[in-house]
Structures are given as C-alpha cells and as structure tokens.
Image: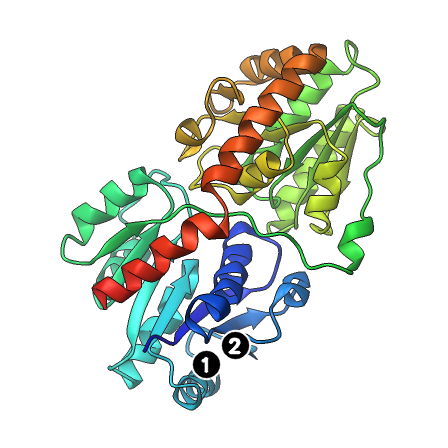
Amino acid sequence: MMRILQLIDSLQTGGAEKMAVALANELVEEIGFSALVVSRLDGPLKIAIDPKVAFLLLHRQSVFDLRALRKLKQFCITHQITHVHAHGTSYFLAFLLKLIWPSIKLIWHDHNGLAKKKSTWIELLKCQLLKSFQGIIVVNTILEQYHRKRFPNIPMLTLPNFYVAPPKNNTWETSSLQGTAGKRIILVANYRPVKNQLLALEAAAKLRTEFPDWSFHLLGHPVHSGYYEQLIQMHGKLQLDDYVFFYPDGQGVDARMIQSDIGLLCSDYEGLPLSVIEYGIHGLPVVCTGVGALPQLIEKEMGFLVAPNQVNELVKALRTLMQNPDLRLSMGKAFQYKINQSYTAKNVMPQYVGWVQSNF
C-alpha cells in the first residue's frame, strides 16, 4: 500500500509549492492517505491544505539540522510513509532521511527550466545524491532528455502541472486590481531575475503613450529582495507609477486573473509555469517567451510566443492583442479549452499514481 509524503521547503505562493499542496490534497482521494511536510517556512498556501492531509512544519534552521531530521523520520514512522516525493531543493533533506532510514523510497520532482548548467561542485554533488533516488519527475521533455542522460537507470515521468481551484471562503477571493476594467495585463511570477519582469517594464514604457488607458499588473512574492528593489527603481525611472502596479503579497491569483484581459510571462527559462496554466483556465490569451514547455503548451490560436529578452517582439505581440478584443476573446477561449482538456487533476493524477504503482 502506498503512503506518499510530499516534501517542500516553504508554503510561499510559487508554482512548485502549489503543486506540492495540490498533489497532497488529490492523493487523499486517490489512495486514501496523504502527507505534506514543509521543511522551512510557513506561508499563505497553508489555508489551501486539505484538513485530511497529515501535515508537519519542521522549522528547519540549517542544512544539517539534526532535530528537524529526527522529527521528519519520526513523522514518517508514525504515518507509515512508503514514499517521499521531494520537490525542488528539498531533495537534500530527503537524501539525509534515506541515510538514517534506508528503506524509504525517494522521488525527486524537478520543476525548474533547463538553464545553462555549470559544472559547479554543487551540481556535481547534486548529481551524486540523486543517484540514490528511485524515481524522477520532470515537467517537460527537455528536462526529461537531460536527466535521462545523467540517470539512465532511474524511472522517469514527464508530468504536467495542473490547475487546482483555490479554497472557498478565503480573503484571496476579494483581491482586486487597479486600472480600467477590460484593459488589464497581468504577469504572475515571483520576483526573481529569471522571471525578467524588467522586460515587462520596458514594454510597458513603450506602449504607454499609445495605450494610456491600459495597465500592467505584476503579481508575485519578492523571493530575491535585491531584484525586487531593482524593479522598483526601474519603475520610478520609467515613470510608470499609474501604469504598472506591483502586488508583492503574491496572493489572490485567481481573483486577480478574473479581472484581467491578457496573461504575460517574460522568463529567460522555464519548466512548465503554473501561472500560464492558470491564465488558460481563466480564458486569457497569452504573450510568453518561448522557453521550456511553453512552445508545446501555447498553440498559435491561443496566444503569442516571443524570443526571450526581445522587447520589440514583446511590444508587437502585446499591441496586437491590445488592439483586437475579438482576437483576445477567441484566443482565450481556445486556450481555456486546451487547459480544461489536459491540465486538470482529473487528467494528470492517474498518470502520477499509475507511474508510482508500476515502478515501486
């Protein structure tokens, strides 16, 4: 009998964190038991955890926090955990757990896009540690090809992210956007250099004179404080005070997308960004950089793909949608249909459960 624990570093509103919570919640119905352990930080996603999910917050203070490690092992023993599904950087804690409890089966979930990898000692160490894992999950075929070369004997699954509705009766439902209704562009991504919100600011500055009644809305959590400060400084330099708005609480994604008209993403690289799937579920046409799995996700009748860090391409695509309400509507409907057909828990969970059952 499978008893799977999701392991994640925090409950901040990032894509990996949302998927860890979503998988934990869905597994309650799929296999009758589910657990979620957060190693470091609490966060706003806590209210989204199903009450039936066994939950533990470790408050891990350091890389080799023995108190947290012992607490994790005891939790696993108490709940008879058979598999630990480690998301992102939590693979290291999962590896330490296996050192003191060798019978546990480990799965690593790589949510990130494939940047230019450097042969640093950290990457080399990571590669060695992952050899002790029994399975690897990735979010696109590019990552799958990359990891199959490194780990040819480890079972691998390409599993798309999927949309899960937020919990009802929470304060997120009342989150609002500034600007004029019917003329809002939303960009949902935590404030990190790889998300390249600076490019969105440049595009906004070029479009402001032509479309003064439109507005841009950048929603995310300031993961990288230095980069967030850089964004604020550029925002002031370009005099975008009443045209581009920041929402650093990172909350109310669904409520704010409902109030929006175009979904935007400017990342330098990606895996399969959950925010773009959320754009689709709410019927938004999209303008995104063509990175990671986005070229496979976004077909030409659903939005526009542009080259990374090319502001003129970005401006051209946004202008086309801003000028054409009928095109926005048709693209949004086409994208929404695709997401509903392939990127919901109903479509994705059988792949996940079947893979775990057949490989472990």
Q: Nearer the viewer, residue 356 or 20?
A: 356
Q: Tell me where residue 173 appears, x and y as whole percent.
A: 78, 51
Residue extending furthest toward the left:
153
- Residue 24 visible to the viewer: yes
Query: What's the amino acid at mark 2?
Result: Arg
Residue 54, relative to residue 235: is it above or below?
below
Which residue position holds label 2?
A: 60
Residue at 55%, 47% in the rendered image = 163
Relative to 72, does residue 37 appear above or below in the rendering? above
- Mark 2: few, some, or many residues within 10 Å (few <14, many ≥20)? some
Residues at marks 1 and 2 touching, judged by CB atoms closer than 8 Å:
yes
Considering the image in quadrants, where does the N terminus appear?
bottom left
Question: Rounded to the nearest whole Å, what is the CA distance between mark 1 and mark 2?
Answer: 6 Å
In the displayed structure image, the side of residue 160 where residue 322 appears, left or right: right
Residue bearing the label numbered 1:
65
- Image coordinates for residue 16, horizontal then vertical, percent: 50, 54
- Image quadrant in which you'd find residue 3: bottom left
Q: Which quadrant holds the C terminus?
A: bottom left
Q: Earlier in the sequence, mark 1 or mark 2?
A: 2
Q: Is residue 184 left or right of residue 133?
A: right
Query: Which residue type carries mark 1?
Result: Asp
* Residue positioned 22% across, 63% down in the render: 359
- Residue drawn at (55%, 56%), measured in percent from left and top? 18
